């Protein structure tokens, strides 16, 4: 227990040193409709739930060897916690869905394909018909599918990859297992929630890819703020509660301090955009029902 806390403290220090500004090899922001372009993780302030707070978790350029953690073999394949590479850079996959169109879908963050705004504002929303979306690749550079939908519009930040039919995918999150369902609970201040994710952030993805955070309540239906550590490359990680239910997508770092009251503590060092509102919006745009694929806890 104490060793884990020490590692988290070290990672928090790393975050402070690295910041969330543009890293080596960054280039100007990508046009949301373009492919083949890169976008840096902007140092501009973002909002989550309308509250100025933080910055989007940086997306390391895929061409930077140091961006890939040493232990990538700890989460192979196409599953929650695995590496995904886009034209923007490297991120982490979150949850697996089965579409009513017969196709499999898997998520990451919206800014992992749309890029970021230089002033921290909304980038927008995009949908791609089959055969037209930007390519998504695994840690080895092999194609796994194409992006079908993406949004970066406060407080939503998610994208969905339409998985190629021949690609095998697993619903189980690396290390933790799950998801066992969806967590839309809104516990108050005296109901802290332990949150888990497996991410591929720089340094963190090597030292401690399976991490936990603590939320002092989850009062908002759109976001969760928690005490935890994330670094560039963790963008898109799926976050589950300790009972295995999917809470949302890890997207921001910084000082999140919306409120602290009897309804719950809405503050922390990481920001998570909740899953249900984003999936509902994606279903509307795509015209496809998306069923979260479940797995047992490990």
Image (tube, helix red, strand yellow):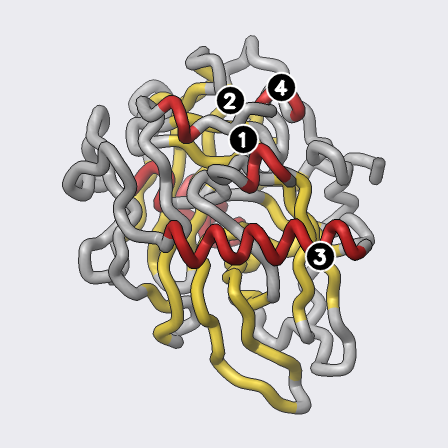
Residue under label 3, please give it. 5
Ranked by sequence position, the earlier of labels 1 and 3 is: 3
20 or 194: nearer the viewer: 20
Q: Nearer the viewer, mark 3 or mark 4?
A: 3
Q: Are marks 2 and 4 in contact (CB under 8 Å)?
A: no
Ranked by sequence position, the earlier of labels 3 and 4 is: 3
Vertical position of residue 24 compared to residue 267: above or below: above
Query: Mark 4 falls on what kind of element?
Result: helix
How far apart are the alpha carbons under marks 3 and 4?
25 Å
Q: Are marks 1 and 2 in contact (CB under 8 Å)?
A: yes
Q: Nearer the viewer, mark 1 or mark 4?
A: 4
Residue 156 is tagged as: none
How far apart are the alpha carbons under marks 2 and 4?
21 Å
| Image coords of residue 163 (percent x, y) | 51, 22
Residue under label 4, please give it. 73
Vertical position of residue 180 compared to residue 35: above or below: below
How far apart are the alpha carbons under marks 1 and 2?
6 Å
Q: Are marks 1 and 3 in contact (CB under 8 Å)?
A: no
Q: In which image quadrant can residue 106 be found?
A: top right
Residue at image coords 39%, 76%: 51
Ranked by sequence position, the earlier of labels 1 and 4 is: 4
Residue under label 1, please give it. 105
């Amino acid at each position: 227990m104490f060793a884990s806390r020490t590692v988290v403290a070290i990672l928090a220090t790393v975050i402070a040193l690295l910041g969330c500004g543009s890293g080596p090899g960054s280039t100007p922001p990508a046009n949301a409709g373009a492919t083949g372009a890169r976008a840096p993780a902007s140092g501009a302030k973002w909002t989550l739930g309308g509250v100025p707070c933080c910055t989007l978790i940086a997306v390391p350029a895929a061409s930077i060897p140091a961006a890939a953690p040493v232990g990538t073999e700890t989460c192979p394949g196409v599953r929650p916690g695995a590496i995904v590479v886009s034209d923007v850079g490297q991120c982490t996959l979150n949850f697996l869905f089965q579409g009513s169109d017969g196709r499999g879908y898997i998520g990451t963050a919206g800014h992992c394909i749309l890029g970021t705004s230089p002033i921290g504002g909304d980038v927008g929303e995009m949908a791609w018909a089959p055969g037209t979306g930007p390519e998504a690749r695994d840690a080895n550079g092999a194609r796994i599918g194409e992006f079908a939908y993406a949004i970066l519009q406060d407080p939503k930040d998610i994208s969905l990859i339409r998985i190629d039919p021949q690609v095998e995918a697993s619903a189980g999150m690396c290390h933790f297992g799950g998801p066992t369902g969806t967590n839309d609970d809104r516990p108050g201040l005296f109901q802290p929630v332990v949150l888990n994710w497996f991410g591929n952030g720089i340094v963190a993805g090597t030292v401690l890819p399976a991490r936990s955070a603590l939320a002092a309540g989850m009062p908002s239906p759109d976001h969760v703020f928690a005490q935890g550590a994330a670094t560039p490359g963790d963008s898109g990680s799926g976050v589950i509660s300790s009972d295995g239910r999917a809470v949302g997508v890890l997207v921001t770092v910084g000082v999140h301090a919306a409120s602290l009251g009897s309804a719950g503590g809405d503050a922390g060092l990481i920001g998570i955009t909740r899953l249900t509102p984003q999936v509902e919006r994606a279903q509307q745009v795509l015209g496809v029902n998306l069923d979260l694929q479940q797995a047992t806890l490990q």
